[in-house]
């Protein structure tokens, strides 16, 4: 065997030994290196299965106070504790009339697919002296649309001050009573009933409740709403 040939043989043998050694080391690292388990997977927050949609005006939107202080938001907080499989979506708009609510109801029903719709509109119709028949027709439209979408309805009424005249104020309140009876839906006759007698419960405009009065309104509506959540 020549020295050149012997050198080639030795070189080949050396490379084979090195390859085997590297393969062994790689295997040893694979076996001995600990595999770190992934941290616990946090489950995504469960989306509430059932929705209460509130269609109201500034009295429900929380005009003049923080949105979190409104009776609707406070209802949501209570619901999270007592009925965690429910949520509240406040689609109330300051200045809203029953005409605006009737125009929006279909889109809101399609977007949210609520199980319950709270209709708390009409105050701005009354303050503007709009025809009672028009207000009633708009509320009727909202109730029928909600029921057609398989949602139950809670109707929340308003009262007008006496300076609007006896016929108008009585007819205004009677609209809610008649609609509740016609469609067999629960009724809160007057949203502001528990606070209306005390001027301190209202902001400087004498119309919108202050933050401290909101829990009383929440409790007032809750009496009718809570049985519907069962």
Image (spheres, rainbow, N blue to C red):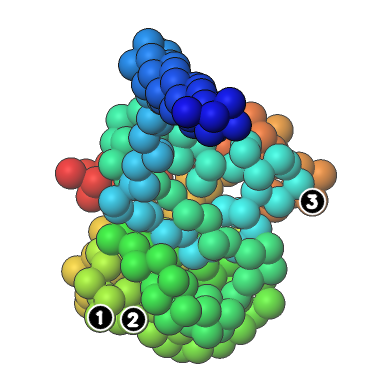
Q: Is residue 15 left or right of residue 53?
A: right
Q: Quadrant of residue 204?
A: top right
Residue placed at 50% from the left, 88% from the top?
134
Q: Earlier in the sequence, mark 3 or mark 1?
A: 1
* Classed neighbour count for the residue bearing mark 1: other residues with Cα under 10 Å, few (<14), some (14–19), many (≥20): few
Q: Considering depth in this image, is 147 or 149 the residue closer to the camera? A: 149
The C terminus: image quadrant: top left
Bin the neighbour count of mark 3 within 10 Å (Cα to Cα): few under 14, some 14-19, many 20 and up: few
Numbered tag placed on residue 148 in the rendering: 1
Q: Where is residue 138? Give x, y as percent.
A: 46, 83
Q: Which mark is residue 205?
A: 3
Per the image, the residue denoted by label 2 is 145
Between 210 and 83, the one lying in front of the other is 83
Q: Is residue 60 above or below residue 153?
A: above
Residue 66 image-quadrant placement: top right
Q: Residue at x 19, y 69 (%)?
A: 184
Mark-to-mark CA distance, 1 and 2: 5 Å
How far from the left and from the top, in percent, is residue 201?
66, 36
Q: Measuring 53% from the left and 70% from the top, which residue is drawn there?
A: 122
Q: CA distance from mark 3 to mark 1?
A: 38 Å
Q: Nearer the viewer, mark 3 or mark 2?
A: 2
* Marks 1 & 2, CB-CB < 8 Å contact: yes
Q: Residues within 10 Å of mark 2 (few under 14, many from 20)?
A: some
Which residue lies at the image location 79% right of the left edge and 51% below the top edge? 205
């Amino acid at each position: 065997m020549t020295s050149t040939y012997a050198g080639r043989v030795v070189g080949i043998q050396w490379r084979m030994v090195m390859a085997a050694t590297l393969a062994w080391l790689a295997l040893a690292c694979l076996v001995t290196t600990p595999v770190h388990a992934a941290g616990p997977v946090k489950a995504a927050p469960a989306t509430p299965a059932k929705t209460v949609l509130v269609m109201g005006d500034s009295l429900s939107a929380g005009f003049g106070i923080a949105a979190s202080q409104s009776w609707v938001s406070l209802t949501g907080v209570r619901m999270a504790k007592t009925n965690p499989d429910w949520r509240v979506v406040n689609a109330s708009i300051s200045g809203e009339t029953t005409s605006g609510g009737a125009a929006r109801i279909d889109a809101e029903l399609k977007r949210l697919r609520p199980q319950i719709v709270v209709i708390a509109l009409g105050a701005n119709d009354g303050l503007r002296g709009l025809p009672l028949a028009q207000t009633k027709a708009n509320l009727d439209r909202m109730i029928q649309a909600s029921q057609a979408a398989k949602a139950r309805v809670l109707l929340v009424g308003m009262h007008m001050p006496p300076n609007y005249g006896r016929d108008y104020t009585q007819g205004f309140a009677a609209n809610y009573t008649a609609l509740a009876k016609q469609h067999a839906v629960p009724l809160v006759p007057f949203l502001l009933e528990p606070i209306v007698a005390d001027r301190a419960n209202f902001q400087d405009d004498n119309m919108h409740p202050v933050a401290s009065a909101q829990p009383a309104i929440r409790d007032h509506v809750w009496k009718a709403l809570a049985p519907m959540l069962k």
